[in-house]
Image (cartoon, rainbow, N blue to C red):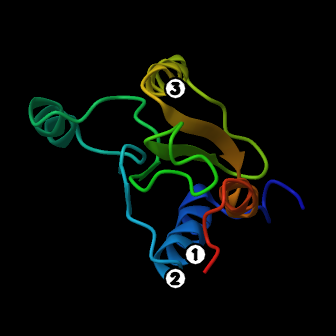
Amino acid sequence: MTANTCPHEQAEQQTLAAWLDWHGIRWCHIPNEGKKTVAYHAKMKRQGLKSGVPDVLIFDPPPMYPADFVGAVIELKRVKGGTVSPEQRYWLAELELRRWKCTVAKGAGAAIEWLESLGYGKK
């Protein structure tokens, strides 16, 4: 897989979204990515959008660790490329302190594998 044939993060997010919805998991996507106008970015910042918040917030505790964690978060990256920013590292560390299970996943496949290791998706 070359960088040119590697799915974009948007395609990876759509694959992960379909899997989460299929399994009835309570979650949301934080749309922090993408190019926005300065005016739009300023408006969103005034409304509380925070830089670095992970892409996926799962509000159901991990089935294998319901007493240990309140939920799970995923910072999703492309399979090839994509780096974790200092703001993203900050959010992941802060959420871990607050009993969220956190990961950075390279692609939807890795994210799904991680979720399954926590017991999500088992019916």
Identity of the residue furthest to the right in this view: 1
Q: CA distance from mark 2 to mark 3?
A: 26 Å
Could you tell whether 58 is left or right of 89 in the image?
Answer: left
Q: Disc 1 or 3, which lies upstream in sequence?
A: 1
Dot 2 and dot 1 residues touching (CB under 8 Å): yes
- The numbered dot on residue 78 is none
- The numbered dot on residue 22 is 2
Q: Quadrant of residue 68?
A: top right
Q: Say what amino acid the circle numbered 3 marks.
A: Glu
Asked whether 123 or 1 is in front, the reply is 123
Residue positioned 45% across, 25% down in the render? 91
Q: Given this view, does label 1 or label 3 mark the residue nearer the observer?
A: 3
Q: CA distance from mark 1 to mark 3?
A: 24 Å
Label 2: which secondary element: helix
Asked whether 66 or 72 is in front, the reply is 66
Q: CA distance from mark 2 to mark 1?
A: 5 Å
Q: Quadrant of residue 26?
A: bottom left
Could you tell whether 82 is left or right of 61 in the image?
Answer: right
Identify residue for label 1.
Answer: 19
Point out residue 108 in the picture as x, y percentages from the top left corner.
Answer: 67, 62
Q: Disc 2 or 3, which lies upstream in sequence?
A: 2
Point out residue 62 in the picture as x, y percentages from the top left corner.
Answer: 55, 52
Label 3: which secondary element: helix
Rendered-image quadrant of the C terminus: bottom right
Q: Say what amino acid the circle numbered 2 marks.
A: Trp
